[in-house]
Image (cartoon, rainbow, N blue to C red):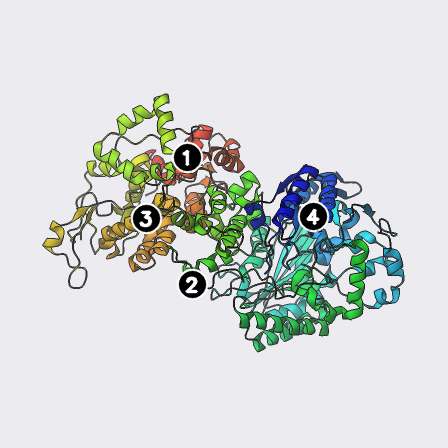
Amino acid sequence: MTDLREARELREGLRAAVRGEVDFGTTARALTTMDASNYRRVPLGVVAPRDADDVAAALSVCRTYGVPVVPRGGGTSIAGQATGTGVVLDFTRHMNSLLSLDPRARTAVVQPGLVLDRLQEAAAPHGLRFGPDPSTHGRCTLGGMIGNNSCGSHSVAWGTTADSVRHLTVLTPRGERLPLGRGWAGAPAGLRELAEGELARLRTGFPDLPRRISGYALDALLPERGADVARSFCGSEGTLGVLTEAVVDLVRAPRARALAVLAYADETGAAEAAAGLLEHGPLTVEGMAADLVPAAADLPRGGAWLFVETGGDTEGEARARAETIVRAADVLDALVVTDPARQRTLWRIREDASGTATRMPDGTEAWPGWEDCAVPPARLGAYLRDFRGLLAEHGLRGAPYGHFGDGCIHVRIDFDLLTGPGVARFRRFSEELAGLVVAHGGSLSGEHGDGQARAELLPRMYGPDMVALFERVKGVWDPDDLLNPGMLVRPAPLDANLRFAVLPREPVDVAFGYPSDGGDFSAAVRRCVGVAKCRTTSAPGAAVMCPSFRATGEEEHSTRGRARLLHEMLAGELVTDGWRSTEVRDALDLCLSCKGCRSDCPVGVDMATYKAEFLHHHYAGRRRPAAHYAMGRLPVWLGWVARTRSAGVLNALASVGPLARVAKRLGGIAGEREIPRVAGETFTRWWRGRGAAVPSGAGTGEGDGEGGGVGVGAGDLVVLWPDTFTEHLSPSVGQAAVRVLEAAGLRVALPPTLRPGGRPVGDGRSRSAARLLTARRGRVCCGLTYISTGQLDHARAVLRRTLDLMEPVLATDAPVVVLEPSCAAALRTDAPELLHDDPRAARLAARVRTFAEALEQYAPDWTPPALDRPVTGQTHCHQHAVLGDAADRRMRDAAGLTGELSGGCCGLAGNFGFEKGHYEVSAACAEDQLLPAVREAPEDAVVLADGFSCRTQLEQLAGVRGKHLAEVLAQALGSGSAAP
């Protein structure tokens, strides 16, 4: 439909007929242009139906206007079948319920938008589970799984989704409600006659292998297979009817599990061994090679591994079965794990492969397209050898992994999908690989469906007569070709509609360096491949991503949603106003800049950086929101307060209700927030007052007494960074850190505060008297508040002044200890990426240490005081994402602080939670993990919160005083319990 008037009529017709949301706006359309495939189609609009009646009404209106309909679940399809040019039906918003669960019958009744993990959570108390479990189990929906006939790692034990489907309720494109089941139940008129006229073809035309997902499952209609219409509907990719309800079977979950990790020399060895392990009845036989495994992974020695899971009623029984498999396998090395936490860590390596595989070891991009071919398991080793050979012939690289026990291989390949010659090679390779798969008796798709990626090649697998039969079946179900046209039958070419074709060919002028993406912002945005790990609502362990999505449940507030909008902004077709886009601005508005995606996203999307970049351009030459001036330039205002010694006056005024309300309104601060108190004495003023001595070896002439005069022979010297929050708002943290560092035998200095004028002479280290005479006073700053609000020109200026001040420190070996995790993260990553043309930024980043890291590395013989108390609180999101908390964990263990800190984000996130309009989301983020963890903690628990934002959120929302680790250790030193 190209006529604007008809599009408006369609929209209004849908709004009149449907009780759910009808959205034809730019944002809704941009969020659904892509799934997790290489393809992109721009829909006319999105409908979120409330129930089956809404679905029927939407189908009726779309049929009237001849507009295609695309059913969509989690949008994680890898073959392009969740994209379309008509109306997208989004089932995740309303039709997402578990309607009932019958433990005795081991069945559940579900709506299509129900996320798999929600079903698993409901079934678990009854000792049950849904058998298939794709790696996207935290966000894929049951409707999408049925549409694709998804499988997952446990398919060797529990089969595909079709094996777990009992009944389906389906709406045909013409509005007929069909209850699908066995014995021709629910078959549309003409289907039985068509199938019974082709029995010979149905009996001989389908390869016999466990992962044959390609095409329509018409062999399920054979009389000897029960004429199961529901089973034949599975894997039809939304092209035959629209699922509104399903009755699915559940399986008994083993009470205990063991994981045997079997190591082989290479992937071929692992592949050849996989089929032989099936006779032992494993739950999984998953394979992956070293090119997808992080270097730090705790795996047995080898070049490839099989993850073989076994079950039992007891841990001993599960372990015994795993050890039997180890003895039966010819391995280089092996490991059997029964600890559930360690199993989850190992499984995360495998589950994240769909994302990590999108980057080759050298950083080159890799893409789906041949993601999940399947061959008979006994032929997997031979197929992989031929597959590797074909890659080499075409000059391509890929890292295979997947369901070795079922002969199903996942792989991302470094196709060049940006240029004409690269796309042509993609087509040639695809055609030749299809022939190779068929030669090995395989299926073009073994899990994710054909979509646009493989449907064009189905004649090579099935022959033209079977494909013609598929078209006739489509005509029986959908005579108007309304549902998902271009998929499975009469498909679009596999090299059309590529999502990269619309992106700019020249690099975009940007502020950050994007070193992992060759300085190309488009490449950074392309990192998001759509696997949607950011859409999970129950993050395991310490995971952070994505707090705003977890608070709102809206796609536009997920990392993927924002990346999609940035993609469309660069494309310029749908989002047409570039950096000035209000759609992108509004989607980024609720991004907390927690950086959780930087570590939790399998491909390392860094939305905090993208947000800062966007805000920098969006407000260039324009007036900014008041909060950007009030909080983005916080170091300036607090420095002014310190110089005028007006903290007492400011605090008194802030305590007067009417004055505080006016100040918050003028500053763009949420009315619900309390303004934090400014310390009466700054940290550096306290430092001067204690009579800090100049360390021996100070000879640069740069110090002024405050900084301690850092010298070249620093030895056991550590430079303590007086960040804005420690300096002005919580100097007690800095005081505690000094006490602990000195108790550990370290000498503490602060950074210099004199920045020499003029240029260095000679070797760049000499200092002339003239330079000292023209020196200017200043303070170091990481630029965090400027970066988070996108004031990148200011941030660069502040960071360059900081580097000038830090030159004497960089001339030594002294580490820079940063107490505030967000400031440490800014120095370690943002500074070198923003000042990518200044090598000093990288040198400073390399010196940055957290408080615990400094103690562990520079005072290794010091033993912290024994506290022997439980701990609660939250690992700072920037520490989780950028810095790592291994040293903190070891320090807590050494001090006898027992227990785990929660994951997630506190929700205050620097300026975010203070900004007007963010309070509710900020509080919801805190309620996700932090506040429940603190409420449920023992009475004597130590509440740890290293970040000023985390401590402020705890105090304002829960009335709890959180403490920095330095404060906890310093307090214990005062009790006399310190070890020598």
Q: Is the C-beta separation of discs 1 and 2 under 8 Å?
A: no
Q: Earlier in the sequence, mark 3 or mark 4?
A: 4
Return the residue at label 3. Answer: 795
1 or 2: tag closer to the N-terminus: 2
Task: Using a 10 Å C-alpha cutoff, classify the residue at mark 1 as few (fewer than 14 neighbours), some (14 to 19) or many (20 or more).
Answer: many
Answer yes or no: is residue 314 visible: no
Spatial CA span between label 1 and label 2: 35 Å
Q: CA distance from mark 3 to mark 4?
A: 47 Å
Residue situated in front as seen by the camera: 401 or 965:
401
Decide which of tag 4 and tag 2 comes sooner along the chain: 4
Whether residues under marks 4 and 2 lie with C-beta atoms below 8 angstroms apart, the answer is no
Quickly name the residue at label 4: 142
Distance Cα–Cα, label 1 vs label 3: 21 Å
Mark 4, Cα crowd under 10 Å, few <14 / some 14-19 / many 20+, is many
To which residue does mark 1 refer?
914
- Residue 722 on image: x %, y %: 29, 43
Tell me the distance, in whole angstroms, between the alpha carbons under discs 4 and 1: 39 Å
Q: Is residue 722 above or below residue 386?
A: above
The secondary element bearing badge 1 is classed as helix
Position in image of residue 359 (x %, y %):
51, 62
Residue where numbered disc 2 is placed: 518
Measuring 69% from the left and 74% from the top, which residue is drawn there?
Answer: 435
Instruction: Find numbered disc 2 in the image and state the secondary structure of the residue it sits on.
Output: loop
Q: Nearer the viewer, residue 927 or 970?
A: 927
SS class, disc 3:
helix
Task: Please say if 902 is above or below 391.
Answer: above
Q: Position of residue 306 (x, y in %)?
A: 62, 63
